[in-house]
Image: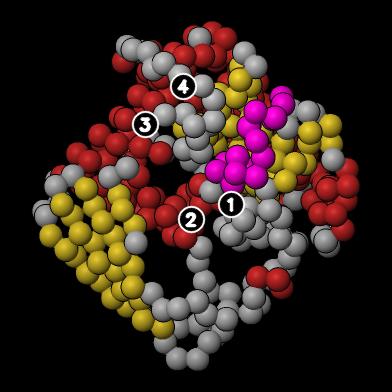
Amino acid sequence: MNQFVAPRQRVAVDPITVEVIGSALSSIVEEMGEALVRASYSTNIKERRDCSTALFTINGETLCQAEHIPMHLGSFLAMIPLITKRFPVAEMQPGDVFIGNDAYEGGGTHLPDIVLAEPIFVEREIVAWAINTAHHSDFADRGHAHIYQEGIRIPPIRLYSAGALQKDVQDLILLNCQVPRERLSDLRAQMAANRLGVQRMQALCEKYGRDIVLSAGDALMDYAERKMRAGIATIPDGTYTFADVYDNPEFDGEVPLSISVTVDGDAMRLHFDAPPQMRAGFNMTYTALLSTVYYAVKTVVDPTILPNAGLSRALTVT
């Protein structure tokens, strides 16, 4: 149930229309990604393509993600819930854009990954979110002992309000960058990518109707769940374990890591036994762990599963 707007009536959509709309959603996020790469300024984004784009439901579920960098799913998972927790949805307006990068309060994987999210309005109501992340490479090196050495921490805040740039926010961010002109150009590329996603999603809703598009999105997530469960069901029930050790110049000795994977019918539970947080650039946030698990299981079970929130419903990660 949509918790941010009045409940939406899910309508029946025939499989052919679901497939057509699903292809359209995939095209939107891929086009967003190409626009971000082509409009960017830095080598890190334009040539390394260290960026990702996606559409999210209003509740913060992945509706469709471009096939760019799987780890960036972790940059997205917490962003929309954090935005809606901090800002009343009823007060949001077309042209609002939110920015964040903090691994704990901004949805990022690490501070160089800056996320921009923009609500998509149709008929004066938010129906989805356009979101992207890009790695801004001049924030800091990785040989640090704590997060404050990595760069400025940005919780979800407005960068644009009703289409108007909040220049004081932008100035604060750029002042903490080593190459501010490059960062500004890349932020503008991120803005352009999201605006493209907003326009394409609005056009799709105008063509097929808002309820049809959103119901097709629900059907696509259900389909991803069915494919994931069908793939897991082919694995014999039981608990599978693996253990290894990790060494790194940042700390002395070796660190033990282990995982147990339990398959029960069409569901899978993954439990990680890891050491406590370390004072080194080695720790991993929970959302980054989730994105890693989702991608790894998808790859093993069925690589053709759609990259949306449905694929994670059969998985429990502890």
**Which of 92 and 42 lies nearest the eye of the viewer?**
92
| Residue 295 horizontal/vertical position (percent) | 39, 50
Kind of element beneath mark 1? loop
| Residue 152 horizontal/vertical position (percent) | 75, 62
Q: Mark 3: few, some, or many residues within 10 Å (few <14, many ≥20)?
A: many
Inter-mark Cα distance, 3 to 1: 22 Å
81 drawn magenta: yes
Q: Can residue 45 be seen in this view?
A: no
Q: Is residue 257 found left or right of 237 in the rendered image? A: right
What's the magenta region?
79-94
In primary-sequence order, the first of circles 1 and 2 is 1
In primary-sequence order, the first of circles 2 and 3 is 3
In primary-sequence order, the first of circles 4 and 2 is 4
The residue pinned by badge 1 equals: 107
Q: Residue at x 79, y 51 (%)?
A: 183
53 drawn magenta: no
Q: Which amino acid does label 4 sit on?
A: Pro
The residue pinned by badge 2 equals: 287
